[in-house]
Image (cartoon, helix red, strand yellow):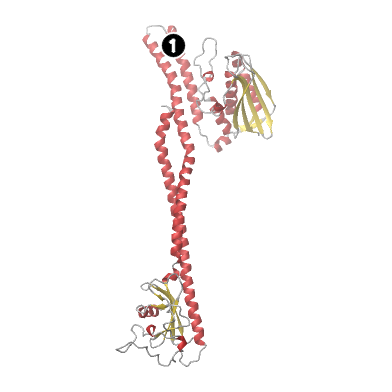
């Protein structure tokens, strides 16, 4: 399977994952935003209603205090202007004589109000309330209901009037409610009541006095819709950014599987071919077929090495368990021992190994895995060193870090390739590609491209980092390629 095919197959899956991510985040944010905006709207509504009730209670309190200060001569307190149309028994209509309409007579025991307080054609009537047309004001209609059930508008405190056809029922419902305040759904009126002697004072306000929440709700809805659109755009961008590592991991996995399959396919092909030859020559003695058996053994060992490396890379040890097995390791002795092990390999390849190791540099770690790390770096340097050149192994303590570096003179690694030298199965070019079986006396070079990936994992497991630098060296003979000093450096925490 090619990496392009794997990436193409991943696109639908990643697209579905991205859509689910955006849908989930938008659902959560929408629910949270709706809950927050609903709470704000409800609190504003409750505040508006409380303000209306406060105003009604304050108006009744003022009216009651003024009433208490008057003589008990039966006059209406506050010298209200009597509006005949607004004065009628509870539950009934004003009694009028047949014939032309005439002003109603004042109640018994009351004085005729001054002419100045009587509304005339030049005096605007207060706005009517009770049909939801209070126009956002807070007009209050105050009535006094006596023991005989006669309601009188109190002009001094009345800034509105209840519609004549609604007033009897509104007063009856307000008094029947029995509460100090409440709301009448049919006429859409807030009310408050207060007893003043034998009479009852009733104040009304229109429902529009508490309707400011509606405009706030519309504003909040617009703001919420805009916020959701902005968050949708941010979620899409964030989903792309958040899932980019997943996409890269998917592509790396597909590439890893394809490369591993290719690397395993080659030795398997050789093994099967050799076995087919051996079977076709079954009448020959084993000694005569040693060439094919030896080739089979070589490829089998290479497959064993590759599978071991793959298993090493596939391991995801628990950090706590991994560190529980750590011990103090003398990295100086370890690096010197690995360099001695590769002396024969370096000699076979025409290079030499020089060590510059600071003594007694210790780290906490797994000695076997640190040996593997040093072996990978030294082996890699020996493979690609120019014949007759020198591989330098250095170790020094720098602050709280132990710094191990391995350098060799060999082919230049391009900057764009340096970023990938620690990737699995990555090989720079033909000069760094596995050459298969050794040809004659020439040693086999290259590998599967897993050594440096394993070295990076070991460094990470020990809390360290690994890096590579390749800088141009002295000019090489024409056609020999550009030479460079390539250095791999590992930094580990000191014990």
Q: Where residue 477 sits: x, y (%)? A: 61, 14
Answer above or below: position of 225 versus 253. below
Determine crowd level at label 1: few under 14, some 14-19, many 20+ residues with C-alpha closer than 10 A.
some
**From the viewer's perspective, is residue 230 above or below residue 445?**
below
What is the x, y in percent for residue 312? 51, 28
**SS category of the residue bearing label 1:** helix
Query: Seen from this angle, which residue lies furthest front?
Result: 122
Q: Nearer the viewer, residue 261 or 49?
A: 49
Residue lying farthest to the left in this orientation: 98
The N terminus - image quarter = top left
Q: Quadrant of residue 140?
A: bottom left
Q: Quadrant of residue 169?
A: bottom left
- Residue that badge 1 annotates: 292
Residue 27: x, y in percent?
A: 42, 50
- Frontmost residue, 163 versus 432: 163
Frontmost residue, 221 versus 245: 221
Residue 404 appears anywhere in the view:
yes
Q: Quadrant of the C terminus?
A: top right
Q: Nearer the viewer, residue 430 or 277?
A: 430
**Residue 159 in the image, given as x and y percentages of width and height:** 46, 78
Can residue 330 be seen in this snapshot?
A: no
Is residue 477 rendered to the left or right of residue 111? right
User: Which image quarter: residue 359?
Assistant: top right
Q: Is residue 475 above or below residue 70?
A: above
Count up the numbered dots: 1
Task: Give the residue at x 40% y 92%.
Answer: 108
């Amino acid at each position: 399977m090619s990496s392009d095919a794997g990436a193409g197959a991943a696109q639908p899956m990643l697209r579905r994952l991205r859509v689910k991510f955006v849908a989930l985040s938008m659902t959560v944010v929408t629910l949270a935003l709706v809950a927050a905006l609903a709470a704000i709207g409800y609190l504003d509504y409750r505040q508006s209603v409380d303000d209306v009730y406060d105003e009604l209670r304050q108006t009744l309190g003022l009216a009651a205090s003024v009433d208490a200060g008057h003589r008990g001569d039966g006059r209406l307190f506050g010298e209200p202007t009597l509006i005949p149309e607004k004065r009628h028994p509870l539950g009934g209509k004003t009694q009028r004589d047949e014939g032309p309409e005439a002003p109603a007579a004042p109640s018994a025991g009351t004085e005729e109000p001054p002419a100045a307080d009587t509304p005339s054609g030049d005096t605007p009537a207060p706005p009517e309330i009770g049909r939801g047309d209070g126009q956002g004001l807070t007009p209050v209609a105050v009535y006094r209901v006596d023991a005989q059930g006669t309601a009188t508008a109190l002009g001094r405190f009345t800034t509105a009037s209840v519609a004549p056809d609604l007033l009897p029922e509104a007063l009856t419902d307000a008094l029947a409610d029995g509460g100090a305040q409440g709301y009448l759904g049919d006429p859409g009126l807030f009310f408050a009541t207060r007893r003043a002697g034998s009479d009852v004072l009733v104040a009304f306000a229109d429902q529009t006095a508490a309707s400011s929440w509606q405009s706030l709700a519309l504003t909040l809805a617009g703001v919420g819709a805009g916020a959701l659109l902005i968050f949708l755009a941010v979620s899409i961008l964030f989903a792309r950014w958040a899932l980019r590592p997943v996409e890269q991991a998917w592509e790396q996995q597909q590439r890893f599987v394809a490369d591993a399959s290719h690397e395993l396919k080659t030795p398997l092909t050789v093994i099967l071919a050799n076995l087919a030859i051996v079977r076709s020559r079954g009448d020959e003695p084993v000694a005569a077929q040693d060439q094919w058996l030896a080739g089979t053994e070589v490829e089998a060992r290479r497959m064993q090495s590759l599978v071991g490396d793959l298993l090493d890379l596939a391991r995801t040890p628990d950090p706590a368990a991994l560190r529980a097995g750590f011990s103090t390791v003398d990295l100086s002795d370890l690096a010197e021992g690995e360099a001695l092990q590769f002396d024969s390999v370096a000699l076979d390849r025409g290079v030499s190994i020089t060590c510059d190791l600071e003594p007694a540099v210790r780290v906490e770690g797994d000695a076997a895995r640190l040996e593997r790390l040093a072996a990978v770096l030294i082996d890699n340097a020996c493979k690609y060193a120019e014949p007759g050149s020198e591989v330098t192994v250095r170790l020094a303590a720098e602050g709280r870090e132990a710094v191990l570096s391995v350098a060799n003179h060999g082919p230049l690694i391009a900057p764009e390739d340096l970023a990938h030298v620690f990737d699995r199965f990555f090989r720079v070019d033909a000069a760094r590609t596995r050459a298969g079986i050794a040809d004659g006396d020439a040693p086999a070079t290259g590998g599967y491209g897993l050594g440096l990936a394993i070295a990076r994992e070991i460094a990470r497991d020990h809390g360290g980092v690994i890096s590579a630098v390749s800088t141009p060296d002295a000019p090489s003979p024409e056609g020999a390629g550009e030479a460079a000093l390539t250095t791999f450096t590992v930094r580990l925490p000191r014990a």
